[in-house]
Image (spheres, rainbow, N blue to C red):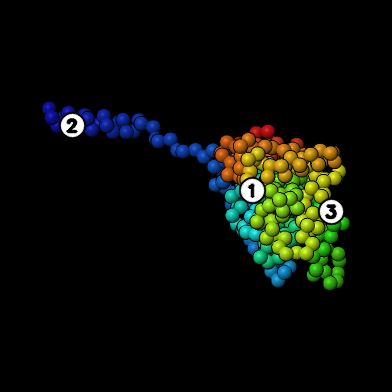
Amino acid sequence: MPGRSIACAALAAAVLTVAAPAPARAQLGEVGTFLATIDNHYRVVPNVTYHTASGVENKLDVYAPLNPAAPAPVLLMIHGGGWVIGDRATYTMRLLPYLEMGFAVVNISYRLANVALAPAAVEDGLCALRWIAGNAEEYGFDASRVVVTGMSAGGHLSLTTGMIPSSAGHDRQCFARAFSGPRPADPATVAAIVNWYGITDVVDMLDGPNTKGYAVEWLGSLPNREEVAARVSPLTYARSGLPPILTIHGDNDPIVPYEHATRLKDKLDQAGVTNELHTVPGGGHGGFTDAETIEIYQVIHSFLARHGLGGNGRTSQQQD
């Protein structure tokens, strides 16, 4: 009978509907879980003034673990832009791998050439180290385990921040407001430097085949510009006792010659400084492929882990 056939079909459909398993719920991977819950584990404190000079307030943003079981190692991030342009906000996404590794992060701005010529930016990096030391308790920093990193001009400033001794006098402006009371905190200890294609010889960029407009602008018309350029060149400070240094550089970089990386490595080797050079074959000035970038961060992760830094991240996506 037609009616009975229709009823049987409806019953069969109902049985199949009940028996059919529910659609599988999509599962977040370890990285997805970390990103989804990062707000539960970190606090962000933006626009903190760490230094005032040349009539401007230098600002930084802090990314600090919430309720850390122990003081966290610190990643000091310094943006690039040839000392003439750039903004720390554009580097926010670059902080995520370090947050995953268990670092607190301090992301700084500094005086660009339109505010103050060299050596102002170098001074600011050194003052940021003093700020980290002076605020370690408030933010849960381990001021004895600071890693400094940056790209291009930020790579240069990461090197100067970690290599220039107080005896060079570049951190004197950090004391400008200390009219009375206790001496400002000693700088935090730079435990390692991760230099992404940074300038290592500023003098080389002022004249000759490697002249770059950004370097000329940063030194401007200073009457002693070559002397200042030498004083802010990382090659000047290659000596024993420096923290471990990892340099990342493409061997086809048109903005910062690859030779700057190899010369730094040679000088550090001669001084007996632990250092590594990771070369990106055919690589330019950043803009690396996904595969190249993943390999770079694997190298960084292994480098830092070997020196007792980081390695307490919440996922296991990166392998030594």
Mark number displayed over residue 165:
3
- Name the residue rendered at 23%, 33% in the picture: 10
Name the residue type under label 2. Ile
* N-terminal label among 2 and 1: 2
**Tag 2, which secondary structure?**
helix
Name the residue type under label 1. Ile
Tag in front: 2 or 3: 3
Tag in front: 1 or 3: 1
- Name the residue rendered at 39%, 32% in the picture: 21
Q: Position of residue 274 (x, y in %)?
A: 80, 39
* N-terminal label among 1 and 3: 3
**Distance from the alpha carbon under mark 2 to that under mark 1:** 76 Å
**Tag 3, which secondary structure?**
loop
Is 175 rendered above or below residue 285?
Answer: below
Tag in front: 2 or 1: 1
Q: Is residue 268 left or right of residue 62?
A: right
**Distance from the alpha carbon under mark 1 to that under mark 3:** 28 Å
Q: Nearer the viewer, residue 57 or 263?
A: 263
Q: Nearer the viewer, residue 35 or 8?
A: 35
- The residue carrying pointer 1 sits among few (fewer than 14), some (14 to 19) or many (20 or more) residues within 10 Å by Cα, namely some
The residue carrying mark 2 is: 6
- The residue carrying pointer 2 sits among few (fewer than 14), some (14 to 19) or many (20 or more) residues within 10 Å by Cα, namely few
The residue carrying mark 1 is: 255
Q: Position of residue 9 (x, y in %)?
A: 22, 30
Q: Is residue 207 visible?
A: yes
**Distance from the alpha carbon under mark 2 to that under mark 3:** 89 Å
Say which quarter of the image contains residue 289: top right
